Image (cartoon, helix red, strand yellow):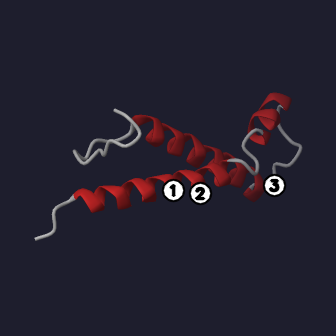
């Protein structure tokens, strides 16, 4: 499939779904850390892991939502109107 090809078969884009899932999990980790007041507590490796997502997960999710919306709009333009 090339850039200009349209996917109107209703198939899911696995990479996009996987990236969304990872960003949602990242937002859950960060929000859990904030809501539980776990700043600076717990194992060092866990604090490092959660810090990977801080500020990035929500930005990635918004970008992926925009990409999904653009794909949706392009697929609507291919459906014949009766």
Q: In which quarter of the image is residue 69?
A: bottom left
Q: Nearer the viewer, residue 67 or 40?
A: 67
Q: Nearer the viewer, residue 60 or 71?
A: 71
In the rendered view, would you say 79 is above or below 39? below
**Front tag of 3 and 2:** 2
Mark 3 crowdedness (10 Å alpha carbons): few <14, some 14-19, many ≥20? few
Which residue appears at 51% of the width and 56% of the height?
65
Looking at this view, name the residue that lies furthest to the right: 40
According to the picture, the residue beneath numbered tag 1 turns out to be: 65
Q: In which quarter of the image is residue 26?
A: top right
Task: Identify the mark nearer the N-term, 1 or 3.
Answer: 3
Q: What element carries label 1?
A: helix
Q: Is mark 3 on a helix, strand or loop?
A: loop
Q: Nearer the viewer, residue 81 or 19?
A: 81
Considering the image in quadrants, where does the C terminus appear?
bottom left
Labelled pair 3, 2 in contact (Cβ < 8 Å):
no
Percent across and percent down for residue 25 are 59, 44
Mark 2 crowdedness (10 Å alpha carbons): few <14, some 14-19, many ≥20? few
- Residue 37's label in the rendered image is 3
Labelled pair 1, 2 in contact (Cβ < 8 Å):
yes
Percent across and percent down for residue 40 are 89, 44
Q: Is mark 2 on a helix, strand or loop?
A: helix
Which residue appears at 41% of the width and 39% of the height?
3
State the separation of the CA atoms marked 3 and 2. Answer: 25 Å
According to the picture, the residue beneath numbered tag 2 turns out to be: 62
Which residue appears at 57% of the width and 48% of the height?
24
Task: Identify the mark nearer the N-term, 3 or 2.
Answer: 3
Looking at this view, name the residue that lies furthest to the left: 82
Percent across and percent down for residue 58 are 65, 54
């Amino acid at each position: 499939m090339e850039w200009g090809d349209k996917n109107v078969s209703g198939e899911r884009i696995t990479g996009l779904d996987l990236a969304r899932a990872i960003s949602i999990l990242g937002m859950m980790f960060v929000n859990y850390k904030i809501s539980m007041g776990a700043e600076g507590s717990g194992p060092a490796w866990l604090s490092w892991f959660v810090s990977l997502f801080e500020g990035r997960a929500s930005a990635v999710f918004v970008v992926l939502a925009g990409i999904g919306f653009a794909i949706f709009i392009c697929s609507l333009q291919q459906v014949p109107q009766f």
